[in-house]
Amino acid sequence: MIDPVFADDLILDVPYEAGSHHVSDEEIIDFARRWDPLPMHTDLAAAAASPFGGLIASGIHSFGIYQRLTVLNVYRGWQIIAGRRIHELEFPKPVFAGTTLRAFVRIDRIVPRGDGRSVVHKTGTLVDDEGDLVLRIHPQVYMWDRTSLLGST
Amino acid sequence: MIDPVFADDLILDVPYEAGSHHVSDEEIIDFARRWDPLPMHTDLAAAAASPFGGLIASGIHSFGIYQRLTVLNVYRGWQIIAGRRIHELEFPKPVFAGTTLRAFVRIDRIVPRGDGRSVVHKTGTLVDDEGDLVLRIHPQVYMWDRTSLLGST
């Protein structure tokens, strides 16, 4: 049994480590065939002839890797209601096949709504083998507060 | 053979229709098990007991559906170099299992960089069966200009 973690339990400004994920050719191509079938993500020859000189992951795939790692390794027990918006999603460097990515998530702000829920503002990052930032994301999610327990039936 | 479409060929302010996609229970669960394994997306019983009362798609899944539809139905021949950033990504309403989503993309602004590339600012939307907006996204992507042909070897 995992203890529930409410919005008011989160620690501000300290990055939570969310583990790592190896990005293979096969995974890039498989993801992109379903969800982002541009040749730079699906076709080794086209990718080699591109300005990047090799296969790069879809940005949506990078977003998925970030989310998978944070859900599995950080959000255990977190009382998440739903995502609200992503204020900003940046791809400062391409994700090449063969890279291992590490994920981090930091809590920037917790805004109680007064109805037992808070909006939690986060900064998420993915870093590649060379220590370079490949994804930065600013999500806002709804979470339950501890006080929501009082109102539950 | 598809004619190439450069940044300067795009039509501003008119929504391009990108077709539709049916979202099944199975697809929501399959996507979420890989990339967003929160119970609201992977577990029918947990989802039924949630404030939404049923299974809802991961926001990353919705983003993937939008991208799949626009790549397959709109971006044929478009000379896309890479995504730069998503300025804003909003989920105004949950995507429930059994919904059919329609995608649209509009070109808001084309900013030439003077090096044969432009930054193209877009607004993308996904609309559900009831005509309600479920995803709105403001991506910026790099595309080749027609003038880039002059410099190519």
Image (cartoon, coloured by chain):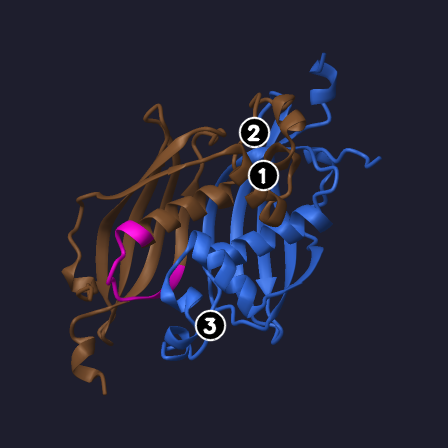
Chain colours: A blue, B brown
User: Residue tagged by mark 2?
Assistant: B55
For label 2, the SS is loop
Query: Residue B52 lies in what quarter of the image?
Result: top right
The span picked out in magenta is B72-84
Q: Secondary structure at mark 1?
A: helix
Q: Chain of mark 3?
A: A
**Residue sitting farthest toward the bottom:** B153
In what quadrant of the picture does the C terminus of chain B appear?
bottom left
Say if A20 sits above or below A140 in the image. Answer: below
Q: CA distance from mark 3 to mark 2?
A: 34 Å
Query: In this view of the protein, which residue sits in the foreground, B34 or A87?
Result: B34
The mark nearer the N terminus, 1 or 2, is 1
Percent position (x, y) of residue A55? 46, 72
For the residue labelled by badge 3, is the local secondary structure a helix, a strand or a loop? Answer: loop
Label 3 crowd (10 A; few <14 / some 14-19 / many >=20) = many
Verify CB contact (< 8 Å) between mark 1 and mark 2. yes
What's the chain of the residue with tag 2? B
3 and 1 marks on the same chain: no
Q: What residue does disc 1 label?
A: B29
Point 64% across, 43% down: residue: B37
Residue A39 picture location, percent across and down: 37, 66
Left/right placement of residue B118 relative to residue B11 reads right
Residues tagged 3 and 2 counted as in contact (Cβ below 8 A): no
Residue drawn 59% across and 66% down? A23
Q: CA distance from mark 3 to mark 1?
A: 28 Å
Kind of residue sitting beneath label 1: Ile
